[in-house]
Image: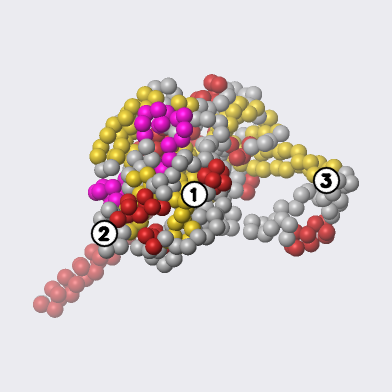
Amino acid sequence: MIPSTRFKLFFSLVLALALMFPVAGAVQSRSLPDFVPLAEANSPAVVNISTSRTVESRMGRGHPPIELPDGLPQDGPFGDLLRRFFGEEGQGAPRREFDSRSLGSGFIISDDGYVVTNHHVVKDADQIEVRLSDRRTFEAELVGSDPRTDVALLRIDATDLPTLKLGDSEDLKVGEWVLAIGSPFGFDHSVTAGIISAKGRSLPTENYVPFLQTDVAINPGNSGGPLFNLDGEVVGINSQIYSRTGGFMGLSFAIPIEVAMDVVDQLRETGRVSRGWLGVMIQEVTRDLADSFDMDRPMGALVARVLPDSPAEAAGLKSGDVIVGFAGEEVPRSSALPPMVGRFSIGETAEVDILRDGAPKSLSVKIAKLPENDDQARAHTQAPVEPPSAAMEMFGMDVGPVPDDIRERLDLPEGGVLVKDVAQGAAQRSGIRSGDVLLMINSHALESPEQMSQVIEDLPAGRSARVLVQRRQGPIWMPLEVPE
């Protein structure tokens, strides 16, 4: 009797486990999203965009100009070999024309023919064609285009078109499912899915777009296509991929839809885009720099330079200020500030919260219109090396006065010191290098090598000081460890 009872208990346990796993598997499979209704409902409003432009060249054998891969000099022996093989480019050769074509994606936002895509898809195009899901093809008019956000608005002569519903990328969470529809490599209405892997990404070439980062498979041809949430709402425009080969590598970037639509509304109304301008060059606050400011954590945007005749200069902002708030919003990192300022109304006054020498302060800034041409730093050359200064031995760098030619090229005011040589030591570990011009240490403006010696003598040992360094690319704050 006892063995029979034990057997029944064992059998019941095995049966229960056997029944449990299929049920768990079914529950897990039901938890995965079903993209079929979303793709079926929205594909008709996603379009294929093809562009063409005529390129003129002067080549001996009628070939288009030879473009060498990145890293190979055009005037090197490899380039000479290719030109001799395919034909020399010369004044005596006849001019020839050839067509350059590109493909991309887009989507319809209004039933009377307005189509959104990327600026780089239609850049310099002589002709733009939009092909709908029913295979109708229209020649499109370029209403306007904005390189800074990579958004373009087209118009086709058609009515009663299918449209997409727009959502809000602010509601997205990292890890949330998203879906893309586009024409990678020219394959119309290809659907790929993935998740949001990060928000508010800043890319080196795009300062005014807080990109959505995803792991959705995006390839050449997907550019300009929509990114959907699970409610079938457009939350972004697929714009860029990160790749070493030109193919999908697991990182893709989309323009948040509210950023894109702000641009679209301006293009639709005036054909151009105006955005707010503060007039500062900024950088990230690192952990070491935050320590030099006595900040609890790294945050905000560190002002490296205040541009002349700018709203920031008029309001009293200074190099070394840390902007921690703009118009009532916290600035979590430097990349968040340009989009905030860019979207702000021109001519309106914004409250800017800063930390200056560790103390909070609020300034009122009247936002101006961003100039057409961005301010760029000028190049400089290195002065002749002079005997090392004994006062700089503690940092491992030798400094001297700034020569007039360098001061003129950098458009620098009076003062500053030139780094002539860097040996092993604190300066080298901080990234300071020969040819840098040091403008400030903490809140002290540097006027000469002798005055700099006095400044560093008063620095607390074992702490990080912040140094404003002027380079070819512009000014940058760097942390400098003060030896004990």
Q: Secondary structure at mark 1?
A: loop
Quarter residue 427 falls in:
bottom left
Compared with residue 258, is residue 58 higher up or lower down, i.e. above or below?
A: below
Compared with residue 252, is residue 18 higher up or lower down, i.e. above or below?
A: below
Looking at the image, is mark 3 or mark 2 nearer the viewer? 2
Between the residue at mark 3 and the residue at mark 2, the CA separation in whole angstroms equals 65 Å
Q: Which residue is mark 3?
A: 58
Compared with residue 20, is residue 201 higher up or lower down, i.e. above or below?
A: above
**Residue under the image location 55 percent in, 23 percent down:** 268
Q: Secondary structure at mark 2?
A: loop
**Residue under the image location 84 percent in, 49 percent down:** 90
Q: Is residue 306 magenta?
A: yes
**Mark 3 neighbour density, 10 Å: few (under 14) some (14–19) many (20 or more):** many
Looking at the image, is mark 1 or mark 3 nearer the viewer? 1
**Residue under the image location 59 percent in, 54 percent down:** 246
Quarter residue 283 falls in:
top left
Q: In the displayed structure, does residue 134 sit left or right of residue 209?
A: right
Q: Which residue is mark 1?
A: 402
**Mark 2 neighbour density, 10 Å: few (under 14) some (14–19) many (20 or more):** few
Q: Which residue is mark 2?
A: 461
Amino acid found under the numbered disc labelled 3: Arg
Looking at the image, is mark 2 or mark 1 nearer the viewer? 1
